[in-house]
Image: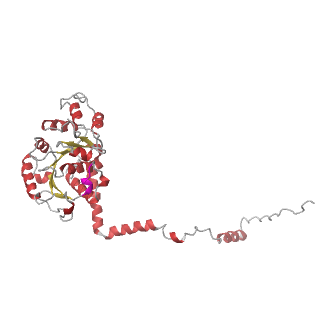
Amino acid sequence: MADERQPSRTPPRPPAPRSGPARMATVSARATVPAPGPEPVPPGRVGQRGAPLLRAVGLAAWRALDPRITARLRTERLRAEALAAPLRPGSIAVVGPVQHSGRSTVAALVALALARHQGPRVLAVDAAGGGGLHGRLAAGSGGSTGTVLAGLGIRDADLGRRSGAVSHRWLRERLALAESMMLLAPAPGTVDRPVGAQEYAPATTALARWFPLLVTDTPPLTADRVVPVALTRAERVVIVVPDDERRLERLERSRSWIAPLLWRPIEEVAVNVLVQRDAARSDALAPKAEPVFGVPTFSLRYDPALRAPGPLRWPDLAPQTRETVLALVSRIVRDMRSDR
């Protein structure tokens, strides 16, 4: 027997009036229907959507209310601007009166901070030997001094191109031993030797054409003839001594030895760095706020990252170390800006 049930049909909706009072009544009725709201937030997540905004507002209010935070942020901004500004060509000599004073480490830190803002325009030069600067900066085991000086025609060795045939690309390929800067240094444990007294002036003059910012690690004072050569050509001098009971004596001795070689008063050219190498003394000695013998003085406190072997990496340094190095380097380049 055939199914006599008929499919249910929904009666057609009457057309809405196009105008008049009936049309207005229909629109008002639709407007009163509430729109679907957001999905309910689970009980454990209430308030998390606005948490980042609240944290940002709280941090901004904290900075505005605490003058120390505001002053520090302003100082960091001014230092970053000073380091990123165009700098005229110049040489920075890092010297010290004794061995194992942290001189190579300070030279590497200065070059590293400069290279973060100036890039491959920075050339670190190892005139001290011993592998100190190479170990603090080089990413590999190779050296560059012999090949580059031979290519420039300064050192008699069949290691590079003939004199006058070098190019910027050729030099960068051989000097790119570090990650963020150029490095002229011999490989430790090889017959290659650092830049000598007679080679320093012609080598740095030739390389300054492509790499105008030089940071030189020198031997201890009075130990090598390359030291006075580097000092007479330096725009800035960094004097490094251990931060111990004899620091004032060593600073005075360094000052008396360096001052006659400089072309400007030592108070305008030099900065002192006191290196704390003992963890037990890192809290006993406060950073130096006043100049010592008229020279600005910075205290580099103990940092395990500076004692670890291998190349230095900026993110591995303690915050206080980074702050001290940035303050030091911004003070060094303060008068080296090309717009002054």
Does the image show residue 140?
yes
Left or right side of 243 for 26: right
Residue positioned most to the front: 189
Which one is nearer the viewer's eye here, 316 or 53?
316
In the rendered image, residue 339, in percent from the top left (x then y), is placed at 24, 49
Q: Quadrant of residue 76?
A: bottom left
Q: Residue at x 86, y 62 (%)?
A: 6
In the rendered image, residue 310, in percent from the top left (x then y), is placed at 27, 48
In the rendered image, residue 216, in percent from the top left (x then y), is placed at 19, 44
Q: Residue at x 21, y 50 (%)?
A: 105
Left or right side of 229 for 21: right
Q: Quadrant of residue 224?
A: top left
In the rendered image, residue 204, in percent from the top left (x then y), is placed at 19, 39
Does the image show residue 293?
no
Is 306 colored magenta in this rendering? Answer: yes
Q: How is the protein colored in the picture?
A: secondary structure
Q: Quadrant of the N terminus?
A: bottom right
Is 15 colored magenta in this rendering? Answer: no
Q: Residue at x 26, y 46 (%)?
A: 137
The number of numbered badges drawn on the structure is 0
Q: Residue at x 21, y 31 (%)?
A: 150
**Over which residues does the magenta segment extend?**
303-309
